[in-house]
Image: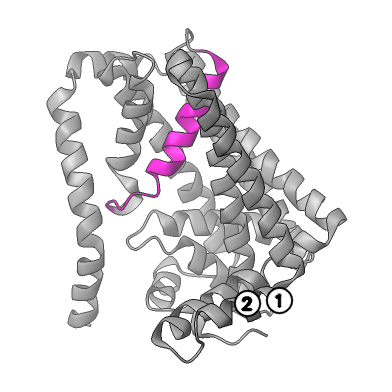
């Protein structure tokens, strides 16, 4: 047990250091009077609205998951398991994706390995949408200093990447044979990489089913609409002078910032991402930090409330689920 705790701390240490550095920088530059004044202007009504919109986003994400899982889970189980995953992501080691795969696998009688492949595809599209936001907004931010050629090249690369993903989904055997010619399956690299590639490909079947894919994509985009609404509502309250597209840029930078190693719940890193992104629009650092604190608070409160309710409704215990997923390697499981 002591050795396991030591390993957890070793895995957490880089993120804790990163968060500590960013928090130190934020504290050094913040004007506490400006920060507290900005927070005082936040009304309970704003928090309630943001909570409701965030709740709807979890519902939409759950509906998307139902589609890719062939409607096996109920609407409620999809919703609660999504929120449980986001709750687990707030804890050390960010076990949300693995945790919700394990939970959902048990609910629908499927291998967590199988469920995890659907989560990977979901995350790939999240990254693509984030990149699209940045490709669209960076030229607006940079104005004349941004090269139009670079813009078209970046956009073309995204389109090529999407087309390639659809081609691979429909030609998985051909792609794997090609990959095995480059990376020998018996080699150390092959044993590490190839199983993970197969894992990824096994969850991409929906890309070859146009009708189901469009329904799934509708719910994925609906989730992003809710996330954008959450940010735009809060930005209108804090910074009504900013244009709509500024929110897309902040959303994109915030999403990338969430991927940086951090202490549990992304403390410091999330706020830092908001301060940096809003700084491009001349927003005072202290006001930007207040905005970041509000957005981060909503991102924590919403899954904590619904996730804990979900664990109770499904008869699960947070501690037991966390412990069971801590050392789980889904890539080593056989696909059912």
Q: Which mark is residue 93?
A: none
Residue 244 forms part of the magenta stretch: yes
Query: Foreground: 128 or 248?
Result: 128
Image position, residue 287 (x, y; %) = 31, 18
- SS at mark 1? helix
Q: Residue at x 45, y 28 (%)?
A: 250
Q: Is residue 206 left or right of residue 99?
A: right
How many numbered circles does the render carry? 2
Q: Is residue 233 visible?
A: no
Q: Residue at x 61, y 47 (%)?
A: 58
Q: Is residue 250 above or below residue 183?
A: above
Q: Is residue 255 visible?
A: yes
**Which residue is under mark 2?**
178
Q: Is residue 77 left or right of residue 324?
A: right
Query: Foreground: 158 or 96?
Result: 158
Q: Is residue 24 left or right of residue 106?
A: left
Q: Residue at x 53, y 63 (%)?
A: 311
Q: Is residue 318 above or below residue 189?
A: above
């Amino acid at each position: 047990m002591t050795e396991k705790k030591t390993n957890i701390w070793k895995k957490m240490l880089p993120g804790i250091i990163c968060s500590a550095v960013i928090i130190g920088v934020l504290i050094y530059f913040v004007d506490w009077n400006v920060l507290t004044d900005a927070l005082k202007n936040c009304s309970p009504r704003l928090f309630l609205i943001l909570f409701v919109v965030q709740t709807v986003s979890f519902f939409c994400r759950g509906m998307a998951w139902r589609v890719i899982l062939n409607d096996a889970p109920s609407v409620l189980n999809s919703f609660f398991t999504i929120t449980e995953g986001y709750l687990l992501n707030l804890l050390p080691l960010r076990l949300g994706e693995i945790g919700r795969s394990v939970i959902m696998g048990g609910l629908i009688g499927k291998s967590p390995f199988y469920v995890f492949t659907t989560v990977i595809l979901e995350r790939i599209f999240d990254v693509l949408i984030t990149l699209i936001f940045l490709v669209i907004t960076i030229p607006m931010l940079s104005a004349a200093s941004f090269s139009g050629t670079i813009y078209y090249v970046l956009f073309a690369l995204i389109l090529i990447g999407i087309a390639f993903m659809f081609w691979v989904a429909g030609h998985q055997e051909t792609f794997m044979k090609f990959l095995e010619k480059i990376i020998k399956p018996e080699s150390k690299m092959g044993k590490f990489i190839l199983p993970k590639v197969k894992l990824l490909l096994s969850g991409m079947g929906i890309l070859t089913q146009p009708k189901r894919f469009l329904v799934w994509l509708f719910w994925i985009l609906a989730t992003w609409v809710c996330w954008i609404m959450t940010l735009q509502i809060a930005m209108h309250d804090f910074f009504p002078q900013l244009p709509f597209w500024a929110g897309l840029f902040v959303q994109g930078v915030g999403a990338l910032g969430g991927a940086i190693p951090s202490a549990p719940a992304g403390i410091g890193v999330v706020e830092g991402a908001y301060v940096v992104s809003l700084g491009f629009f001349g927003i005072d650092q202290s006001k930007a930090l207040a905005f970041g604190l509000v957005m981060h608070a909503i991102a924590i409160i919403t899954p904590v409330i619904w996730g804990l309710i979900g664990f109770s409704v499904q008869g699960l215990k947070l501690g037991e689920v966390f412990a069971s997923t801590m050392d789980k390697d889904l890539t080593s499981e056989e696909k059912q």
